[in-house]
Amino acid sequence: MLTVATLTRGLKKGLSITWELSKVIVPVYFIITIFKYTPVMGWIARIMEPVMHMVGLPGEASLPLVLGMFLNIYAAIGAILPLGMNTTEITIIAAMLLMAHSLPMETAISKKSGAKVASLVLVRIIMAFLVGAGFNIIL
């Protein structure tokens, strides 16, 4: 049953989650926007262009990809927004990050369970690029 207490609790939790996500997304958004208007973005794009071209992405797309792989998906979202990517590019990055996201945290968890983490991380990164290449062909 919907009550005032339920609505109040839901609003508080919603605002709390929004605040937590904003603490990651907003700073990353501003940093990437600053990079975009300085030579830094050009340097990164030129270095990463050959690798990113294999999956149909511009060199700048390496920033959200790396942030998603090593921090979390929310950092990747904060980095994608200021780059002005089209839906195809965003879809490719999203698919890649589904294969390999939050690697340090998930590696620590996998290590506790007894998995060989080096091979696990390598397989996830390779699969991310294979999925990206596949989506690039399909889309």
Image: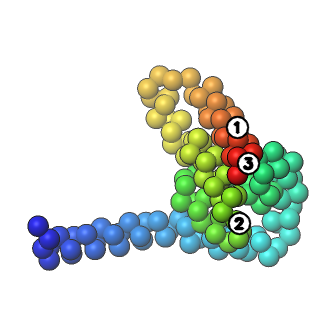
Q: Of 83 and 106, which appears nearest the observer? A: 83
The residue labelled by disc 2 is: 85
Q: From the viewer's perspective, is 3 left or right of 34?
A: left
How many marks do you count on the picture? 3
Q: From the viewer's perspective, is 9 left or right of 79?
A: left
What residue sits 46% from the left and 35% below the top?
109
Q: Is residue 23 above or below residue 135?
A: below
Residue 127: give x, y in percent of width and height. Answer: 65, 35
Secondary structure beneath disc 3?
helix
User: Residue 130: which numbered mark, if any?
Assistant: 1
Residue 67: give x, y in percent of width and height. Answer: 63, 54
What residue sits 21% from the left and 74% below the top?
7
Question: How far apart are the alpha carbons under marks 3 and 2?
Answer: 14 Å
Instruction: Single out the residue that lies furthest toward the front.
Output: 138
Residue type, mark 2 in image:
Met
The residue labelled by disc 3 is: 136
Residue type, mark 3 in image:
Asn
Question: How far apart are the alpha carbons under marks 1 and 2?
Answer: 20 Å
Residue 70: give x, y in percent of width and height. Answer: 61, 48
Residue type, mark 1 in image:
Leu
What residue sits 81% from the left and 45% below the top?
54
Question: Which sits earlier in the primary sequence, circle 3 or circle 1?
Answer: 1
